[in-house]
Image: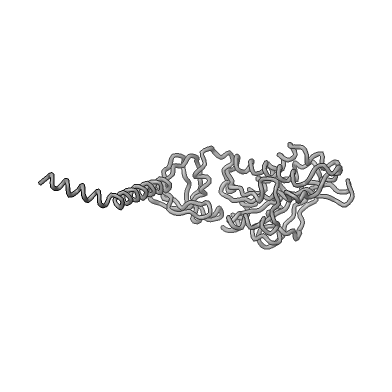
Amino acid sequence: MLRRGMEIIKKFLIKFWLPLGITVVMLAIALAFTMVLLVRQQITVHINNITIRQGPDVLKSAQGMLKKGEHLNILDRDNGWYKIQREDESTGWVAGWLVERKEPVKHMSLLSEATIELDPGHGGSDNGASSIDKKHFEKNYTLALAQKTQSELQNNYGTRVLMSRDDDQVVGLLKIPKVGEAHRANAFVSFHFDSTDENNTGSGFTSYYGKEDNGSQELAQYLNSSMAPVMPIKNLGVKQADYIVLKYNSVPSALLENGYINSSRDFKNIRNKKYQQTIAKRVPLGLEQYLNYQAKQTE
């Protein structure tokens, strides 16, 4: 009886080995995929003081704070934000890039939960303005400055930074604002260096804004105020301008002209890495003050 049963099973396996094999493989893949999803939905917090908010944005109301070592379930994702469930089953939204971060944040603030787009002006075949000797181009210094600012924001504040470009390439002017808009950026900052028709006839730094009704004017003012005390060149103030990256941008936006590249005096600073680093350290302070202002407006 047993032998007959074994023969029946053997014949069955021989006849249906292919569909059975496929079924087993598919079940194994499905099980592995399910395990991966389960692992991805769970995470451990590695840094302290991550704010829990009522929605996926830094300006949403706070409702708690995460501590290092907490175990979370991720229920949903929205533009870099995680909807999480804590061990006490309470839920809320947190900045996903902070939850994923392993290194402590030196300056934890609203800026840590913000998404900022940095735009190094010009690039590729578009050199921008040039120095008096025509050997140094605006595009290279805007990129260097933006990268220093990116490093400062990410390393010391934990900010999520978007770059309109991170190498020597042309980016269409109308495409630049789309980067921040697609990721619901909280602010946009474009870096430039000014120029005049005649060499050595201009000097100073200027902060520009485009729209007056979306926070751009306040953003430009806070950035200008944060830079003014430490800049070695004249402050030309805050002005309105219809630059494309400002005019066609729904994100609060500012454009910084950080000196005249065809001015011997200004260019001496522009090419100095310490000058670039000074600006890179002051821009986050202006952004932080701007976000604090915005938060008060939403209370």
Q: Quadrant of residue 135?
A: top right
Q: Is residue 189 left or right of residue 129?
A: left
Q: Residue at x 66, y 49 (%)?
A: 165
Image coordinates of residue 143 in percent, x first then y, are 71, 45
Image coordinates of residue 275 in percent, x first then y, are 75, 39
Residue found farthest to the left: 1
Image coordinates of residue 242 in percent, x first then y, are 75, 61
Q: Nearer the viewer, residue 165 or 228?
A: 165
Q: Residue at x 71, y 39 (%)?
A: 277
The coloring applied to the image is one colour
Residue 107 visible (yes or no): yes
Q: Nearer the viewer, residue 216 or 138?
A: 138
Q: Is residue 164 left or right of residue 71?
A: right
Q: Is residue 112 above or below residue 79?
A: above
Q: Is residue 275 above or below residue 201?
A: above
Q: Dividing the image into 4 quarters, which one contains the C terminus? A: bottom right
- Total numbered badges shown on the rendered structure: 0
Q: Is residue 9 left or right of residue 21?
A: left
Residue 224 visible (yes or no): no
Image coordinates of residue 172 in percent, x first then y, are 70, 56
Residue found farthest to the bottom: 213
